[in-house]
Image (cartoon, rainbow, N blue to C red):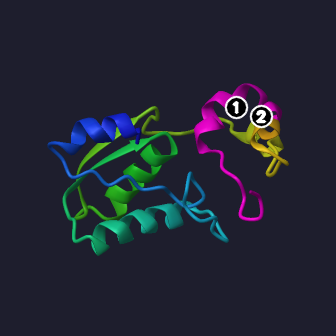
Amino acid sequence: MSSGLARELGESWRVIALDQRGHRYSDRPSAFSRIGYIEDAATVLEHLGIDGAVVLGHSLGGVNAYQLAARHPGLVGALITEDIGAEVDGDLSFSLSWPHRAPNRNQLLAELGPSASAASGNVRPGGDLA
């Protein structure tokens, strides 16, 4: 969620922005799986005692939001998805060639080529990099 949207909603809504595993500032997990993303979100809602939440998901978060609502209907009262359809069937194999690590942010973004603009906000140094 953008910080601008969070600020706008914050006056009227309780806003909780989840950095999903391996995204932005979250720790890098040993495994990535759809069920892991869903259970992470469910655990946050349960820990905070929230049921019937309005869940907003963008892109991958939208797919996860659909599945969170399906697997934990009591936790989700309304669902908003953006930049993702109800069915995801595109060929994403192009991303397999992306570099997993680079010596610095600029080189990583250069190696991502046309995908850099979509990924630039989600790039951060690895645990062993400054």
Q: Residue at x 39, y 51 (%)?
A: 65
Q: Which residues are the magenta region?
A: 110-130
The residue labelled by disc 1 is 116
Is residue 1 or residue 81 the one in the foreground?
1
- Determine which quarter of the picture holds residue 104: top right
Give the residue type that dot 1 points to. Answer: Ala
Q: Residue at x 62, y 63 (%)?
A: 32
Q: Are marks 2 and 1 in contact (CB under 8 Å)?
A: yes
| Left or right: where 97 falls relative to 65 | right
Give the residue type that dot 2 points to. Answer: Leu
What secondary structure characterizes most of the magenta part? helix
The residue labelled by disc 2 is 112
Q: Position of residue 71 (x, y in %)?
A: 36, 64
Q: Residue at x 38, y 40 (%)?
A: 3
Q: Position of residue 93 (x, y in %)?
A: 75, 41
Q: Position of residue 17 (x, y in %)?
A: 37, 52
* Badge count: 2
Q: Residue at x 32, y 36 (%)?
A: 5
Q: Would you say residue 113 sits in the magenta stretch?
A: yes
